[in-house]
Image (spheres, rainbow, N blue to C red):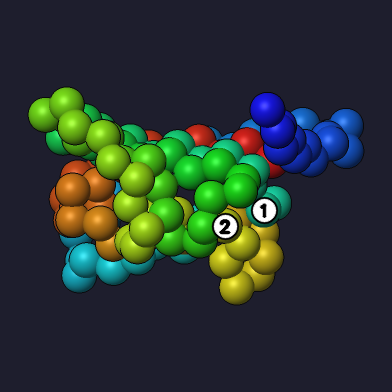
Amino acid sequence: MAVTSTQTPSDGVARVATGRYLTSSTAAAIEIACGFTPKFVSVLNMTSGDSYQWMEGMADASALKQVAAGTSSIITTLGITPSISTGQGFTIGLDLDVNVINEQLSWLAIG
């Protein structure tokens, strides 16, 4: 049996950021500047209970999407993309279950 393992060592600096986002304007992807490029991001729609999670090693714009109805799937578009244009944050894609106008999102990023 072959085993493939990868690991990214910590640089010893803990980076954690949390926040909330609510918009009443046109639906769009959301850029979050948290001060670092995250290795893990979790986004929860506080209204619907739908969420997604992304971790280092997953493709850009992908996520594990979980809807309140109980289904889970890996999405490959409209998910989380680390390192926005400034290189210090992430983008929440325009998935219409999670990123919804007038519904509050809470997010957690760990670097």
Q: Residue at x 40, y 47 (%)?
A: 63
Classify the position of the C terminus by image quarter: top right
Residue 33 in percent (x, y) is at 57, 57
Is 10 displayed left or right of 35 in the figure? right
Q: Please, what is the three-letter code of the amino acid marked with disc 2?
A: Pro
Q: CA distance from mark 1 to mark 2?
A: 6 Å
Which comes sooner in the sequence, label 1 or label 2? 1
Determine which quarter of the picture holds residue 39.
top right
| 67 lies above or below 82 | above
User: Hey, which residue is sitting farthest right in the picture?
Assistant: 11
> Is residue 76 in view?
yes
Q: Residue at x 88, y 32 (%)?
A: 12
Residue 45 in percent (x, y) is at 26, 38
Q: Residue at x 61, y 48 (%)?
A: 57
Kindly indicate whether the residue at mark 2 contacts the one at mark 1 (C-beta within 8 angstroms).
yes
User: Hey, which residue is sitting farthest bottom in the picture?
Assistant: 85
As drawn, the label of residue 98 is none
- Residue labelled with disc 1: 37
> Is residue 20 in view?
no
Residue 47 in percent (x, y) is at 17, 34
Secondary structure category for the residue under label 2:
strand
Q: Out of 94 and 22, give the one closest to the viewer.
A: 94
Is 53 displayed left or right of 44 in the figure? right
Classify the position of the N terminus by image quarter: top right
Secondary structure category for the residue under label 1:
loop
User: Hey, which residue is sitting farthest front in the picture?
Assistant: 1
- Residue labelled with disc 2: 82
Q: Residue at x 43, y 60 (%)?
A: 61
Residue 76 in percent (x, y) is at 37, 58
Determine which quarter of the picture holds residue 109.
top right
